[in-house]
Image (cartoon, grey):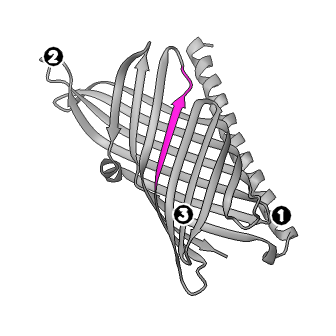
Amino acid sequence: MDTRTQDFDSRNSVVCNKRIGMRALVATATMVCATTAVAESAEEWTWSVAPYLWATDVGVDVAISDNTVVDKTIAFEDLVDDLERVAQIRVEGRRGKHGVFLDLFDVELADSGDRMALPGDSGAELVLDAEIGLSILSLTGLYNPQADGGGFSLLYGTRLINLRNDIRAESQVDGMVLSSARVDSDETLADALVGVHYRRQLGKRWTYQLSADVSAGDTDLTWRVSPSIGYAVGENQRHLLLLGYERLVVDFADEDSIDMDMTMSGPVLAWRFTF
């Protein structure tokens, strides 16, 4: 068997195992939450669901042997133009001092027909079609000493980052294809995570929140910080409108002298339902 074929099969096997592992982890966590919820009465558990919009810019910094080759920031407005699918939601369950927290950010981008002239006088162009996906799942337990969700809470668990790329490139002259290439990858990175969450009531309806965490494992280091302010809505004040800012920095593990960092930052708008 060709060595390149063996390498390709090996990479596919690793990716497949990671994807299966991710699904198993999520399924296990879901079953644990469901079993716990059934075992305890509804009055003892407090749940909240918060769909949110993170208007994030994305910055990418790539260095080879300490020499920067890519240093680019893509504005949120440009990302929206290529948006195919998005899911952003947070779920929190709390009973007494303990609870669970889930944060899912999932986005799919597609861009086709981009053309750029190739060097030289041949008149050749490079035509690119790209589909890029990014999923970030934080799944943690939480411990709140005050047992009411206020003050400081400790977060502990895992963060999964899934990167998907399907990029097709063709060199063309007057519409005639001279050569083509394709890069298709799917990789999931798993980190152990620890963090803190602080929540303080400001008067009757206003709330201040600050969340920060760090993780490491398959990434060299990933950290996130997110301050926000909320306003309680409704007679029973069980719904909360949140406006804040979030910054996430991922330092990917070095490979073959290639160092890559990704930065995501921007305002966050959320609506939290509590029941």
Question: Considering the numbered disc 3 on the image, is that residue within a helix, a strand or a loop?
Answer: strand
First reached walking from the N terminus: tag 2 or tag 3: 2
Q: Residue at x 48, y 22 (%)?
A: 259
Q: Nearer the viewer, mark 2 or mark 3?
A: 3
Does 247 sit left or right of 193 as displayed? left
Q: Residue at x 52, y 35 (%)?
A: 250
Question: Considering the numbered disc 2 on the image, is that residue within a helix, a strand or a loop?
Answer: loop
Q: Tell me if mark 2 has few (under 14), some (14-19) or many (20+) residues whose alpha carbon lies within 10 angstroms of its own.
A: few
Mark 1 and mark 2: Cα distance apart in space: 66 Å
Q: Read off the residue under disc 3.
A: 208
- The percent position of residue 170, horizontal first and vertical second, equals 30, 29
Q: Is residue 23 above or below residue 164?
A: below
Q: Read off the residue under disc 2.
A: 120
- The percent position of residue 235, horizontal first and vertical second, equals 57, 87
Is residue 3 inside the magenta stretch?
Answer: no
First reached walking from the N terminus: tag 1 or tag 2: 1
- The percent position of residue 1, horizontal first and vertical second, equals 63, 13
Q: Residue at x 65, y 46 (%)?
A: 195
Q: Are marks 2 and 3 in contact (CB under 8 Å)?
A: no
